[in-house]
Image (tube, helix red, strand yellow):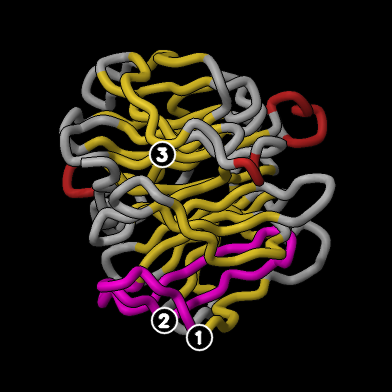
Amino acid sequence: MKPELIADYACITGEGPLWHPDEKKLYWVDIPPGRMFVYDPVTGEHSMVYEGDSIGGMTLQPDGSLLLFMAKGAVRVWRDGAIRETIIEEIPDEVETRFNDVIAAPCGRVFCGTMPTKERKGRLYRLELDGSITLLLEDIGCSNGMGFTPDLKQMYYTDTTARKIYIFDYCQDTGAITNQRVFVETPNAEGEGMPDGMTVDAEGYVWGARWDGGCLVRYDPEGNEVQRLSFPAKKVSCVTFGGDDYADMYITTAGADVRETDGPMAGALFRVDPGVRGVPEFRSRVGL
């Protein structure tokens, strides 16, 4: 399971890897400078396809468009190489910050977190099918990775600065999340880092990236660590499955602006053969 370097765009905060099964390509972003990239594993080619406002996360719509979650709480549709539609221009309470990590739910709603501001901590919202938005959680240190259990009855949610991955009961019909409890609390120790982006594999195990921990950790459904993979980058930010039969794992990293401390490949995109398959991400169905 040695990480394979795929592309090095010297990302300050490489994030949000998303496999596009229609195109058979991987998209990912560099949040602070507002860049988005695409990689074609068949040809090995990759390129920057967008530069503009910061993108904190994205989902895939049924027609293949990307739903971008951006600075100031904006939500926009990107299709055929350009932004084509705006779902939300801005969220008044989020104009000083941006979205950070999102996930589409089975019915097409989107859970979307925001970064803290100087005045308050972060939040978690739910973007409804009609484009309206519902506030779910407040007082979040840094809203981050999410995922669903295979039976779709529970949802994982990460607060990075709290060092915790939570698990909630999840209702598909309403989108409600309830009964919050701790799934994993990462050690507050040198070299362990903090939990960041995550995904759930076909066996129901959770893969969690470790910001400042330089690794990717696999947990069983009870929250026990069963595997750890190290990277030549201190800030491992997010992970997703892709490729044929979702047998490949793609991992983003950050810290290219501080490579002297964060590693020679900080900010690069990697691929791993994990020996287990993933499952397709749900598609958002917002504004349709």
Q: Secondary structure at mark 3?
A: strand
Do the CB atoms of the residues marked 3 and 2 lie less than 8 Å apart?
Answer: no
* 25 lies left or right of 200: left
Residue 151 is a magenta residue: yes
Instruction: Find the distance from the CA under tag 2 to the CA under tag 1.
Output: 6 Å
Q: Secondary structure at mark 2?
A: strand
Residue at 47% from the left image edge and 42% from the top image edge: 251
Left/right placement of residue 241 relative to residue 207 reads: left
* Mark 1, residue position: 179
Quarter location, residue 143: bottom right
Who is closer to the viewer here, 178 or 3? 178
* Residue type at tag 3: Met
Q: x and y percent of residue 13 in the render?
A: 63, 33
Q: Magenta stretch containing residue 76, yes or no? A: no
The quarter in which the C terminus is drawn is top left
For the residues labelled 3 and 2, the Cα–Cα distance comes to 24 Å
Specify the segment rendered in magenta.
149-178
Answer few, some or many: residues within 10 Å of disc 3's Cα (few below 14, many 20 plus, some between 14 and 19). many
Number of marks in the image? 3
Q: On screen, 37 above or below 28?
A: above
189 vs 100: above or below: below
Instruction: Assess whether mark 1 and mark 2 are in contact (beta carbons under 8 angstroms).
Output: yes
- The disc placed on residue 58 is 3
The amino acid type, in three-letter code, at marker 1 is Asn
Identified at 33% across, 48% down, the residue is 241
